[in-house]
Amino acid sequence: MLGTATVGWVYWHLNHNIRGVDINSALGDDRPAPPRTTPSPAGSASAAPLPTGSLNILVLGSDSRSGKADKELGGGDSSGARSDTAMVVHIDAGRTSATVVSIPRDTLVTRPSCPLASGGSTAVAYNAMFNTAYETGGPVCAVKTVESITNVRMDHYIGIDFSGFAKLVDALGGVDVTTTQDIDDDMSHLHLKSGHHHLDGKQALALARTRHGIGDGSDLGRIGLQQMLVKDLLGQMAGTRLLTDPAKLYRVAAAVTASLTTDTGLDSLPELIRLGQSLNGLTSDQVRTVTMPVVTAPWDPNRVIAKQPAASELWASLR
């Protein structure tokens, strides 16, 4: 009885950690059409096969400072929140390979009118920085903005904040990375020599956010570090036998769910587990990382715009 009660409490705790946003209802039909799917093989409901169709998932790392832990890790302006990291994860049919496309936060876009939870909608904004969509209208506006510039339907949304990312890395026991240049960034408090490093959660977050100590100090250099970190984390998770270590499994699950916001299609433990099971054959070696092609904005040397036709051709390949 005690074991059953404990399992029940753990399930309830993890399930209630997840925050869901009903993006489909908020956006309605004013979005790209979903891809055609092949019907699942006939079978009983209890033995329903795992989905194998392609997926597009918008993953955002939020720089929210709304909580004490996020403020301590974030620094800077404590008001508002923007999407510090934005990646469109395209999982191919069969779910054994994937492409991760990073969208530079400094990209100038036409931000569409977005519905607000309080009623009404935002005004269309021209030449707005991409990462202001989240600040303006939350996950709903972030998804709508991505769909408007890519014409690709986002099947799901996943957002995680500063403290959640750091706790995830710590729960995994840290992450091993290899840097190809010295990093000396006082703003992110990260100082690393080139070479192999084992980072804890706070250091890994600093690596994901640093840009002033590498390259030309732009967001493009930071994206390269983020993509390297994502692949290293995937490899770390694949090599960790979580199912044979219940204590570590709980720490990882608690770290992830406590700082997770998803669309309502993924806002429960069974749905997340089912997604994870369907990706069991996907390894870091089968994940390709790219950045949306951009060029410097002619009217602002500190901003970029999508490079055409290369950007449109990239997005077309994911439909």
Image (tube, rainbow, N blue to C red):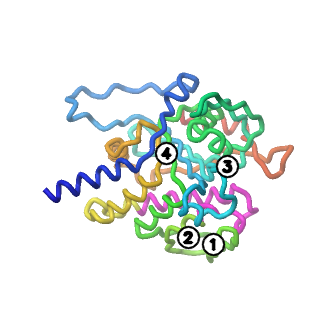
The x and y percentages for residue 80 are 65, 50
Disc 2 + disc 4, Cβ < 8 Å:
no
Mark number for residue 190? 1
Disc 1 secondary structure class: strand
Q: Mark 1, mark 3: which one is toward the viewer?
A: 1
Going from the N terminus, do you reach mark 2 or mark 3 first?
Answer: 3
| Distance from Cα at disc 2 to Cα at disc 4 | 22 Å
Label annotation for residue 203: 2
The picture places residue 30, in percent across and down from the top left corner, at 58, 23
Q: Which residue is mark 4?
A: 158
**In the drawing, does residue 162 fall left or right of residue 37?**
right
Q: How many numbered marks are there?
A: 4
Q: Nearer the viewer, mark 3 or mark 4?
A: 4
| Image depth: mark 2 or mark 3 in front | 2
What secondary structure is marked by label 3? loop
Which one is nearer the viewer's eye here, 105 or 68? 68
| Magenta range | 207-236
Q: Which x, y percent locates residue 179?
A: 59, 69
Image quadrant in which you'd find residue 114: top right
Q: Earlier in the sequence, mark 4 or mark 1?
A: 4
Is disc 2 surrounded by few (<14), some (14 to 19) or many (20+) residues within 10 Å? many
